[in-house]
Image (cartoon, rainbow, N blue to C red):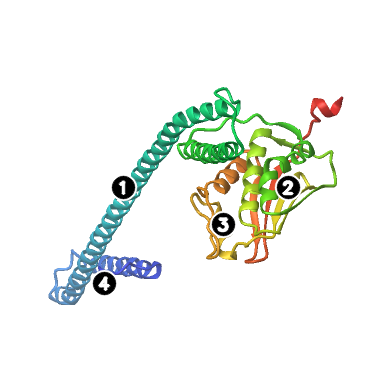
Amino acid sequence: MMDPQQHPTGSELRDFSRRVWEATKRAQGRQEQISPESESGKARESERPFTRDAAEELEALRELNRELEARVASRTAQLAAANLKKDQLIHSERKAREEAEAANKVKSDFLALLSHEFRTPLQAIFGYTELLEREIHGPLNDPQRRDLNRIQQSQQHLLGLINTILDFARLESGHDLEFQIESLLVHDLLETMEGFIGPELESKQLRYAYNCEDKSLLAQVDATKLQQILLNLLANAVKFTPVGGCITLECEGVGEMVVVRVADSGIGIPADKLEAVFEPFVQIRDRESVHSGTGLGLSISRRLATAMGGELVASSAPRQGSTFSLSLPKGTKAPESLAR
């Protein structure tokens, strides 16, 4: 007998079918052996065991049929329960995804609204500091000019944070950023990057080196987005490199890609955090220093790199510095400035 609560195997089903077939054949054989025209007492006496055997075979066949029906009913119930559970899981997954998408949209909308609200008074502050800088209402003495410079630096820092949050909110909300992809002479952009971080390099007494062996390398990129990525990488390098350290910027062609690397001699990144640093709002902090920022720069940079057909990866070891490698597709057409 097969247990209705267990799943039948292939061999069990074949054996069950064989038993049904054999019982049927035996019942048929018994019926054929009984002669309906026999009337003698001897014939009737000989029919009795055959009739009894046939009845037993038929009863066995009915028992097999009942067993089969029980197995079919049990299996049908199991399949119905499994399908119900699957439907419940699909419904739960769909509901969880919808709730997550709704929460993410609320978060992105909030960040965008908050950033815009910050920009409005910040623009007014920019206007008044510019009036002071031009000395329209009278000359400034040295302490006043020094304080004004500090105000302007804080304005630039706050504006950078707001722009970063706006970019992140735009990406999270699913709105595509506009890209103007064209062939760019990479050296022309890279050689200007030192000027953006010059004051920070000087204040921390950091050494800076730039090297590009092939100054004719072309990349198929959006120049503005590439500059944003490099500024994020260099700003991080400055932030996490102690006084007296060094930062290098270099590029080379590797196959069909242009690889730009930003390396520093800073605090480094543990191996298990190399991917986590590209997550939003994640920063690697050490116990000896506190670093400002939103933790969005690397997340946005990787997304921009991916959108331009490239990738951004990191390699590092604690206390041994970090290297961020940006790979971008090579350009196939020289820009007009180079062709001339």
Disc 4: which residue: 3
Rounded to the nearest angstrom, the CA distance separating label 2 from label 3 is: 19 Å
Rounded to the nearest angstrom, the CA distance separating label 2 from label 1 is: 46 Å
Packing grade of label 2 (10 A; few <14, some 14-19, many >=20) is: many
Is 129 left or right of 48, judged from the image as shown? Answer: right
Kindly state the secondary structure of the residue where label 3 is placed. Answer: loop
On residue 275, which mark appears? 3
Give the quadrant of the C terminus. Answer: top right
Three-letter code for the amino acid on which mark 4 is drawn: Asp
Three-letter code for the amino acid on which mark 2 is drawn: Val
Rounded to the nearest angstrom, the CA distance separating label 4 from label 3 is: 52 Å
Kindly state the secondary structure of the residue where label 2 is placed. Answer: strand
Q: Residue furthest top?
A: 136
Mark 3 or 1, closer to the camera: 3
Kindly state the secondary structure of the residue where label 4 is placed. Answer: loop
Three-letter code for the amino acid on which mark 1 is drawn: His
Is 133 in front, or is 78?
Answer: 133
Disc 1: which residue: 91
Residue 294 showing in the rendered view? yes
Residue 222 showing in the rendered view? no
Residue in the image at 64% along x and 66% along y: 319
First of labels 1, 4 by sequence position? 4
First of labels 4, 3 by sequence position? 4
On residue 260, which mark appears? 2
First of labels 2, 3 by sequence position? 2
Give the quadrant of the N terminus. Answer: bottom left
Packing grade of label 4 (10 A; few <14, some 14-19, many >=20) is: few
